[in-house]
Amino acid sequence: MANQVEKVNGIEIGKIEKINGLTDAEIEKINGLEFTGSTDPQYVTFATQDTGGTAIDGGTGFNTDRSEGTSLAFDPDTSQVIVAFSDKANSTVPTIRIGTVSGTTITFGDKIVVSSNTNGTTSTGCHYDTLTDRLIVVYRSNYSPYWTDAGIFAKAFELNSSRGVDTAGSVATVFNSSSGNEVSRGNLSEIQDHDGVVDVLYEDKSDGDDNYIKTVRVTNASTCALTVGSAAEFDTDASNYYGIAYSPDVDRNVVIYNSGNDIKAKAIEHLSGNAAPGSASTYNLSNSYLDASNPHGGSTMIYDTEHNKFHFLFRYNGSSGNNAVNDNLYIGNLTCGGAGNNVITFGNTGNPSTTMNNTEEIDDLKYGYHQGSNYAGGGLIYSHQRQRIIMHGNSSNAEANGTKKFHVIDYNGSAYTKSSSPIDINTQNGAPWDTGSIRTDNTSGTLGNVNLISFFLYGGSNDGKTFIAGIDAGDSAIS
């Protein structure tokens, strides 16, 4: 959205409610120019309740104990939201809750345990496969000899329309080793909508901390049976800083990752059900890292359906120059296409000491893993309805407090426009961790213009409270 229309027949856009019976949210262009509406970016609060109408956690959240690794999905067949999380109130086992949205109220069913044999869960990936109409939940427990079962696993469910499940499949092992594993928590997995394949990323500590990708797919919808593909190595770097996002335009997932002090990316094709990474392309800005979203942020990369581009969030760790500042966050972009849709092309950044092209700098929400393992991080969300990027992060470099905020960012195909100051999400005491969001185009639209997010608070007087909230990126001119 490029904010090109300011007036119609001499009347300011902000004073017009409808044109030919259509609201601003329904109009995309006037005489070929993109339409600027009147809705400002805003944070939307949701009350949560159980099926009896009783508020959950005083109407401010859906869990009072720490819910690490939250992720969200949406079932368009039953119009239900699914949230997956690690439930500290129940030995940190992977858990889901299914809810329906009415206005700004979410009504949840009971907690549904994904696996009682896997405690120590730290990450989840919640995906709805519209090909088989089944929910696929990926979850991870890091290795410890004291836990019943450790590794990366997946399970499929058939949902009913009453906030519950009719069929639960067997647990499928994605990866398990006594040497352990590691993942980039907010970037554990992504589904390819067209064929229902979930790609799962992980670091194999039994193989020199190399990074791998495996596929998971439903092969029997009646029994919710899953099949796991063979492992494919996509890099040897031990940092496990990576992200993944899906393009419906080329029907590919793209993996972005750190290799040394370079950022690289590969397209993922599926051959006989197995992941097949393409050739690596390298970003031309060294000393850049994807640690802003790891370990307690959100997605480090999203896909922009308006411009057919992937946008990614990185931290510059080089010498400060006129247009690049050490330790600040930046947004860059890449495209995937050509030669069987496997060629990655990064946007040209230029010389950081003189010119920075195809990037946007964020200097007020810049805390992440490099500060320490318990610091809240940042992440990206794409608003398909508003055709804007949402960047969220934390305002404080303290472990147990701060304010979660977000920027809205327009991209016109060549340049970014960022809001001048971020908007508050959470002002309660405690650091916001592990932001999940509904990522796919066809599902996010069912909630109107609001992007649902989830997170929990670490430390402080509100330690452990878990929230589902919303962000409307707005359609008014960014200021």
Image (spheres, rainbow, N blue to C red):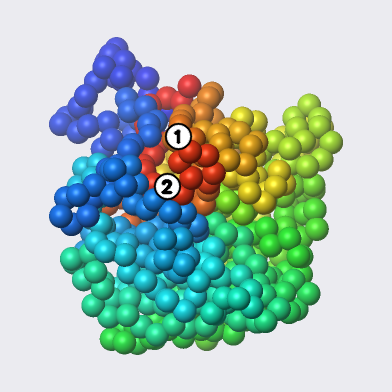
Q: Secondary structure at mark 2?
A: loop
Residue 39: % across, % down? 33, 28
Q: Residue at x 52, y 33 (%)?
A: 403
On screen, residue 373 versus residue 28, left or right, reads right
Residue nearest the observer in this picture, 438 or 116: 116
Residue 348, above or below 114: above
Q: Which residue is mark 2?
A: 465
Q: Which residue is mark 1?
A: 428
Q: Residue at x 52, y 63 (%)?
A: 123
The answer to whether residue 212 is visible is no
C-alpha separation, residue under disc 1 versus residue under disc 2: 10 Å
Residue 262: % across, % down? 77, 54
The answer to whether residue 240 is visible is yes
Q: Residues within 10 Å of mark 1 (few under 14, many from 20)?
A: some
Residue 101, above or below 7: below
Residue 367, above or below 106: above
Q: Secondary structure at mark 1?
A: loop
Residue nearest the observer in this picture, 329 or 48: 48
Marks 1 & 2, CB-CB < 8 Å contact: yes
Residue 172: % across, % down? 47, 83
On screen, residue 165 versus residue 6, left or right, reads left
The extreme right residue here reads 319
Q: Residues within 10 Å of mark 2 (few under 14, many from 20)?
A: many
Three-letter amino acid code at disc 2?
Lys
Quarter-of-image position of residue 364: top right
On screen, residue 158 versus residue 68, left or right, reads left
Please identify the quadrant where the N terminus is shown: top left
Residue 378: % across, % down? 57, 44
Residue nearest the observer in this picture, 76 or 162: 162
Three-letter amino acid code at disc 1?
Gln
Q: Residue at x 38, y 34 (%)?
A: 43
Quarter-of-image position of residue 397: top right
